[in-house]
Amino acid sequence: MRLYLFLFLVATPCLSLAAVPDGWFPFVIPDIAEDSVANVSSYNNTVAGENGFIEVRDGRFVDGAGKRLKFLATNLTFGEAFPSKEIAPKIAARMAALGINCVRFHHMDAHFNPRGIWDPKYKDRRHIDPEMIDRLDWIIYQLKLHGIYADINLHVSRTFTEADGFENAGKLPKYDKGVDNFEPRMIQLQRDYARDLLTHENPYTKTRYVDEPCIAMVELNNENSMLRFSFGSTFHLLPEPYRGELMSQWTAHLRGRYADTQALRKAWDEGSEPLGDEMLRNQDFSQGAAEWVLESRHTEADVFEVADDPALGKVLHARLNELGVNSWDFQIHQKGHNLKDGRVYTVAFRIKADPPRTVNVSTRYDVPDWRMVGLNQSISVGKDWVPYTFTFTAKEPKPDHTRLSFNCQNSLGSVWIADVSFRPGGIRGLAEGQSLEEGTVDFPTAGATRQAWKDWIGFAMEAERKYTVGLRDYLKQELGLHAPVIDTQASYGGLGGIAREARMDFIDIHAYWQHPRFPGKPWDGNNWNIGNTPMTKALGNDTLSRLAMHRVAGMPFTVSEYNHPAPSDYRAECMPMLAALAALQDWDGVFQFCYGDQDVDWNEATIQSYFRMVTDPAKVTFFPIAANLFRRGDVRPADREVRLRVPTSQVLDLVAEHTNDVTGIWAKAGVPRKAAIRHRLALEWTESGELSADSVNLPPGPFVTSDTDEINWMNPEDAEETFWVETPKTRVVLGHIAGAGVVFKDGVDLDVGKTEDGWVAVALTSMDDRPILESGRMLLVVMSKCENQDMGWDEERKTVGRNWGTGPVIAEGIDVTVSFPGRTDLKAYSLKPDGTRDKLIAPTDETFVLGPEYHTVWYEFATQ
């Protein structure tokens, strides 16, 4: 393919729609018609599981007949996992039409009926509601009849309470994360729930779920890792009796390694470094707020002062009274510190807030580009004083230009800081007064000596291995489950997480491009923002290349949550990029998150939230494209596989050094992230040797072509970006290409008209499995902006708050000219939202002129 003409870019106006603007039109997608060119339900089996149980063979999912299965999937969450019996068959049919062949049942355990599986007649969360399990049985049965498999999640958002017999339950981490990996009774209750759910017989399929061939996989515990929480301070702040239980297990672990306290001290004290002199100016606030800075948009309205605390003395108090615009518009910092590259430093402080919030503590440049230089830690801050200590290694600081920053997020209210300290050194061995014999050796922190930190990380890895393998074996051996099993997402725990999941049946991971940020309290619908930039402009910093670095050679690989959230102007890139790169990497399943509400008024349908795609044309229209790219295999796997070879003896050392960062380990072996756009990536365990990787030959500059020549990504700094896919049967072009022309190798020519900001997503695919220039039926999708009417965008177009606007959803019209050389036999049709033909579009010779006047984002080219 070649691009020609200058890539045209116009400024993006801030839309606040009082009516449908010129060139825009309502476009609400109902059920996809059976005879539509966009209906790909034929890709599914007649009945899911008709060929027997799914198993893992040669690193792939196969059915009972040995046929490989690749899953283009979605999620049903919370109450959406229990639709009414009337709507369930329609959901299944619509999903099948889009090419979906697996559904992940997620967050079922969060609530009582009607939004969850628990019986409201009981205060505890241990009794499954008969109505909700019946609804679940029915939707799984309907999906099965449409060739759609099910992915059952066990523990997702179930929260154990006092009613379940857990003291101080309200003081535990959200969803009991980390704790439920080691607390014995929580583990037993997870087993009980798995037994009650999976051995229950579905009256419609006449099978128990452990014996049901349409169950593709089972997930033990969503986004949950004891190891990951061991990297921070979560376990240090646990209430009793949970801290005591963990201390007991930790002490037993140490006693298995060391004979006595003297031996432990000898090992732990090696490499210790005492704290040096205080670096902060006016560290005790005796000079008021001098040397400290409040950064906000409205300093005249906000409060910045030194207050007196009865117990702590002088404390720094900041109060935001008027919101800013960005997530960093409420910061407290001190500038001008001179850090040394590679030296260790310790930051300590006490903090509280009202209302509670997340605070990011960092050391970074105090001049542009504000880059981090070692410390970057987010903490949850409540109304009570909590002490924190962070030890870090400075990385490439700028002389005399490091600031210690407390980013209190753009959220109204007060933050107090006390006992703040910033000093060199602080690597600690065994603290005085701690004894192995008495069981008083506390949990180390990242500021511990290397051996102490390794012992702590090794303990966490072993404890979660015991939990994971034990629960997996219970399902497989005692309950008789046939379906493949994972524990949780491999990225939870870094390389240690991958090692944990390598004991399971496959590898799974999650990612979101520019997930909504909540500067104040989590999931506050009034206070959130998104980046609202395209991933097409992020070559090498994209989410998909990072995911590729978590695959294990010889194991299936799935991405069970992925999305580019609404109301991003560029979310149409989500499905084609995900499908194309997943096919290049030869992954086994990709799951859009999530499907969304079912009881939709199609006449007034709106984009409902960040992730739900059921009413979002930017996602729905690209599902048939994704089905061809990924399931049909239009993008073939990369010719070459690049492997990172990790000696098993070095896993603990690498986890201790890199914690949750896997990309850093690849980089250490010489493989940058953008290598995932050129070759397949996989991690391989070795019994000996050193960390190493196959060589990668990447062209210099911001341009990568896959080794199959089917995917190209160009992201120059001084020009507009383009991501394109060119295979015999499917073409995709994404980026700021509006106002430009695209000519493919076979002469097919696309000219794209101007859009409001120059960005567009275009896909052309054969629907009869023949090359484009031979195809008798093709689908074209053209999309730029797509949103509700009257959306309440802010000035920077980063948020709409709670003002999501009204329906029906509208799409920006785009002029497109398509030429097929040598094809005078084709006709073109604009398509209605349900995918059926609307208007016949006459060609001029071999060229079709399409545009906003047809009020559609998809078209059909056909010989009949």
Image (cartoon, grey):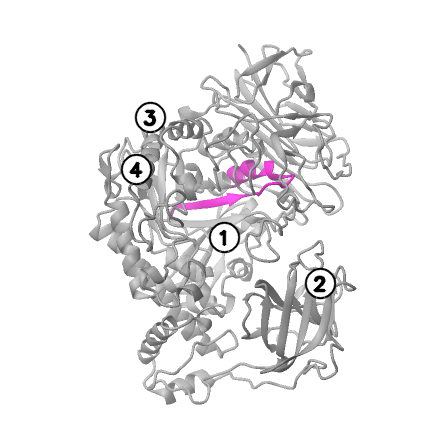
Q: Amino acid at mark 4?
A: Asp
Alpha-carbon span between mark 4 and mark 1: 40 Å
Nearer-the-camera pick, 53 or 215: 215
Expressed as whole percent of the image width and height from the top left, the position of residue 97 reads 45, 26
Q: Nearer the viewer, mark 1 or mark 2?
A: 2
Circle nearer the N terminus (4, 1): 4
Question: Above or below — where is 440 with respect to 14?
Answer: below
Question: Above or below — where is 289 with respect to 412?
Answer: below
Nearer-the-camera pick, 539 or 677: 539
The reply to whether discs 2 and 4 touch (Cβ–Cβ < 8 Å) is no
Alpha-carbon span between mark 4 and mark 3: 23 Å
Q: Secondary structure at mark 2?
A: loop
In the picture as drawn, the residue positioned furthest to the front comes out as 121
Alpha-carbon span between mark 3 and mark 2: 56 Å
Q: Which disc number belongs to residue 370?
A: 2
The reply to whether discs 1 and 2 touch (Cβ–Cβ < 8 Å) is no
Alpha-carbon span between mark 1 and mark 3: 35 Å
- Residue segment shown in magenta: 554-581
The reply to whether discs 4 and 3 touch (Cβ–Cβ < 8 Å) is no
Image point 66% across, 46% down: which residue? Answer: 799
Q: Amino acid at mark 1?
A: Met
Question: Above or below — where is 310 with respect to 621?
Answer: below
Pointer 4: what residue?
134
Pointer 1: what residue?
549
Q: Which disc number belongs to residue 46?
A: 3
Q: What is the quadrant of the N terminus in the image?
A: top right
